[in-house]
Image (spheres, grey):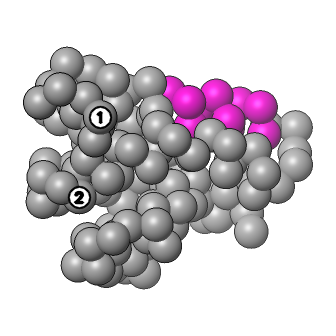
Amino acid sequence: MSIHRGGLMAGLVVLKPGVDWSATGGLFDWTLEFLIGRLSDEQTAAHLQEIVDNNLGSLWIDDLPAAAQQEVVKHWRDGLVAAGEQQLPDSEHKADVIRHLQELVDATYWDGCTGPNDPA
């Protein structure tokens, strides 16, 4: 799988107004696909699959139910970077891509973004 599919397409994850993460379309899709099989909320998983299938290019976390928001954050924090290290193809850009995934994880720690074990 190429993480630079299309090259010009881009994706945007908005954690809250003013806190967002953008990536190539391929990496954005991979980041959502990472979640789809892990989410317990089937409606949220279907919503993410629709974003990928239709090249919608953006995910607003606030649009998800509260429990799904927490689950998304938990999965990203607990496994996104490790999955990227294991699953993404080796290339001269892989280290940069992994750092970029880490930036998304780091962005989930803004004030007001709660994971499942964080005080509300």
Out of 51 and 78, give the one closest to the viewer.
78
Residue of label 2: 68
Residue of label 1: 117
Q: Could one spot residue 25 in this view of the protein?
A: no
47 falls in the magenta region: no
Q: CA gap, disc 1 to disc 2? A: 14 Å
In the picture provided, is 40 more to the left or to the right than 120? right
**Residue 1: percent from the left, percent from the top?**
74, 68
Q: Helix, strand or loop at disc 1?
A: loop
Q: How many marks?
A: 2
Vertical comparison of 94 with 106: above or below: below
* Amino acid type, callout 1: Asn
Out of 116 and 112, give the one closest to the viewer.
116
Please name which of the two marks, 1 or 2, marks the residue nearer to the observer: 1
Could you say which quadrant of the image residue 96 lies in? top right
Asked if labels 2 and 1 touch by Cβ distance under 8 angstroms, the answer is no
**Residue 77: percent from the left, percent from the top?**
47, 37
The C terminus: image quadrant: top left
**Residue 40: percent from the left, percent from the top?**
33, 70
96 falls in the magenta region: yes
Q: Earlier in the sequence, mark 1 or mark 2?
A: 2
The residue located at (79%, 37%) in the rendering is 93
The residue located at (68%, 43%) in the rendering is 82
Out of 57 and 63, give the one closest to the viewer.
63
The residue located at (56%, 30%) in the rendering is 102
Q: Where does the magenta region start and end?
A: 94-103
Main SS of residues in magenta:
helix
